[in-house]
Image: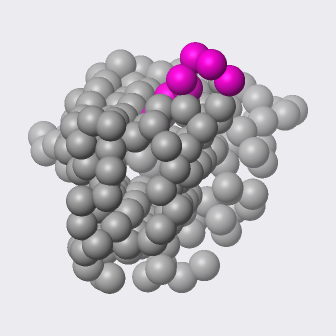
Amino acid sequence: MIGSKSDYLYYLEADKISLGEKRNRPHFISIWESDVIWKYQRLLRKVEYLHNCKSSGIHKIYYKWTQYRLFRAQLKTGFSIPINVFGPGLSIAHLGPIVINGFATVGKNCRIHPFTTIGIDGKNGKVAKVGDDVYLSNGCKLIGDVEIGNGVVVAAGAVVTKSYLEDNIVIGGVPAKVISYSGNFMPANRRGADVAKQ
C-alpha cells in the first residue's frame, strides 16, 4: 500500500514497466487503448496516494477532485477497482468490465483481463486474497473466502470457490481445479515491481 511520496513514485514506475510502456507519461490526447489504461492506472495510484497520505486540510479539496476524476474514468473504461487493493506492477490488459471488491487484496505484478470479478459469496462476506505474480485471464471469477498462491494463472472463464495455495500452477474450469503446473509465463522484464527501483 502506498504510504509515502517515494512509494507513490515506485508504484507509478512499477505499473509503467508492467504495462510495457517506454515513455515517461501517456500522450495528452489518447487515441490508443494502452494510453487510456495507463492514464487510468496513474489516476488510481494518485487517489491512493492522496487518500493514504494527503486527504486532510487543504489537500482534501484536491483529493475529492481527483476522486471524482477517477470515478469518471471508471465510467469510461468499465473498471470498478477500489483503491488499495492491488500491489505495485498492476497491468490491465484491455478495456472492459472488471469488478473488484474493496476488501480484496492482490499482490505485486498482477496481470488482469476484462470480465474478471473478485467478489464475496454472500455467506460470510469474505473475499479473496491473491498472491504475487498472478495472471487473471479473461472472464475468471474468484468468489468468497479463497486464497491464491504466487505465480498462479487463473484460466479464462474459471470460477474459483476454494483456495489454491500451491505456487506456479494453472487453475481452470467450473468449478476451478488444477489443470497444469506451468505457472505464470510473464517475462521477468514485465514484472514491474521487481524491476522498478524503490
Residue bounds of the magenta highlight: 118-124
> Residue shown at 31%/58% (left/top)?
178
Residue 176, given in percent of the width and then of the height, sits at 32, 44
Q: Quick check: can you spot residue 36? A: no
Extreme left residue here?
31
> Which part of the image, by quadrant, shows the N terminus?
bottom right
Q: How many marks?
A: 0
Give the vertical position of 50 relative to 73 (above or below): below
- Check residue 123 for magenta coloring: yes
For this rendering, which residue is in front, 100 or 55?
A: 100
Give the vertical position of 100 relative to 34 (above or below): above
> Residue shown at 24%/66% (left/top)?
180
Residue 157, given in percent of the width and then of the height, sits at 22, 37
Residue 22, given in percent of the width and then of the height, sits at 25, 71
The chief SS type of the magenta part is loop
| Residue 145: quadrant of the picture | top right
